[in-house]
């Protein structure tokens, strides 16, 4: 019988300011770093994100070696983001941009570390990338880094991430209490090491983030996961009816990973 999870070991967390750019450049050595941005109809924001990464971290610092956008059947100008290699999802594809973007990055054979970013962040800065890279470059045992941020909602400084707070975190506390210290289990901003990429099973739909988190914690231990705080993440808050597919996919993955048989 497998040993019960150790819920007493805290998950070490960090702030993006703990990892200055010059330190990361020195720690990188000969490792190859890719940044992948899955996006669907994110014309208003993805261009600025790509521009910042390309200017500051590809050309400027030489920290990032590859920058790509996975365009999930967008109807706007998402695919026109300059400075990134474009991967287009076929019109007949069924998976979400998040799952497809993870698949593109996780299958990259030449990347030692892959950083994933969401394409709808309105207050993006290069610190989103450097913060995620910090623990995975600094600590050999860190396999997965997840952003943990404050999410404004309307005029309030908090209250965003309704599916996270009402669905994902309660499920995690019940089914995977050892991971309850991960404040944003559904965060799309992550960094993953090469050694962990072949050890995850990519879920379809909006449960992909949660599935990766659970799989890596099981295969490499909870302490291989490091949350990093990039401060505040501002993005568009979707109406409730658009959150319904995510609110269904998240418990589906959590229950299946917990061994619950679903029809």
Image (spheres, rainbow, N blue to C red):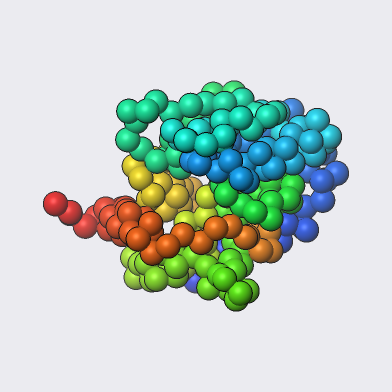
Q: Is residue 78 visible?
A: yes
In this picture, residue 209 sits left or right of residue 47: left
- Depth check: give the residue in front, 141 or 239: 239
Q: Residue at x 74, y 41 (%)?
A: 52
- Depth check: give the residue in front, 83 or 126: 83
x then y, percent, for residue 169: 42, 68
Q: Is residue 177 visible?
A: no
Q: Residue at x 52, y 32 (%)?
A: 70
Which of the 4 image quadrants contains residue 60? top right
Spot the residue most to the front.
Answer: 76
Q: Residue at x 80, y 30 (%)?
A: 59
Spot the residue most to the bottom.
Answer: 156
The correct choice, above or below, for 131 with respect to 183 in the image is above
x then y, percent, for residue 18: 77, 58
Tell me the quadrant of the picture where the N terminus can be found. bottom left
Q: Residue at x 47, y 56 (%)?
A: 186
x then y, percent, for residue 214: 41, 53
The correct choice, above or below, for 58 with respect to 158 in the image is above
x then y, percent, for residue 15: 71, 61
């Amino acid at each position: 019988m497998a040993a019960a999870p150790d819920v007493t070991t805290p998950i070490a967390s960090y702030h993006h300011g703990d990892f200055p750019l010059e330190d990361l450049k020195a720690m990188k050595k000969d490792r190859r770093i890719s940044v992948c941005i899955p996006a669907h109809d994110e014309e208003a924001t993805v261009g600025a994100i790509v521009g910042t990464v390309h200017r500051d971290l590809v050309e400027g610092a030489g920290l990032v070696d590859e920058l790509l956008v996975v365009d999930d059947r967008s109807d706007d100008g998402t695919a026109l983001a300059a400075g990134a290699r474009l991967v287009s999802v076929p019109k007949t594809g069924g998976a979400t941009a998040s799952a497809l973007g993870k698949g593109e990055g996780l299958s990259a054979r030449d990347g030692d570390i892959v950083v994933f970013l969401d394409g709808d962040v309105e207050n993006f800065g290069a610190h989103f990338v450097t913060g995620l890279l910090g623990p995975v470059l600094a600590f050999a045992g860190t396999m997965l880094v997840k952003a943990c941020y404050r999410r404004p909602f309307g005029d309030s400084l908090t209250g965003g991430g309704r599916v996270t707070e009402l669905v994902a975190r309660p499920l995690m506390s019940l089914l995977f209490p050892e991971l309850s210290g991960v404040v944003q289990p559904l965060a799309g901003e992550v960094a993953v090491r090469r050694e962990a990429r072949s050890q995850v099973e990519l879920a379809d739909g909006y449960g992909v983030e949660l599935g990766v988190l659970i799989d890596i914690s099981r295969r490499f231990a909870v302490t291989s996961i490091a949350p990093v705080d990039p401060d505040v993440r501002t993005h568009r808050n979707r109406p409730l009816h658009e959150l319904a597919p995510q609110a269904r996919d998240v418990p589906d993955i959590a229950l299946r990973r917990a061994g619950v048989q679903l029809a």
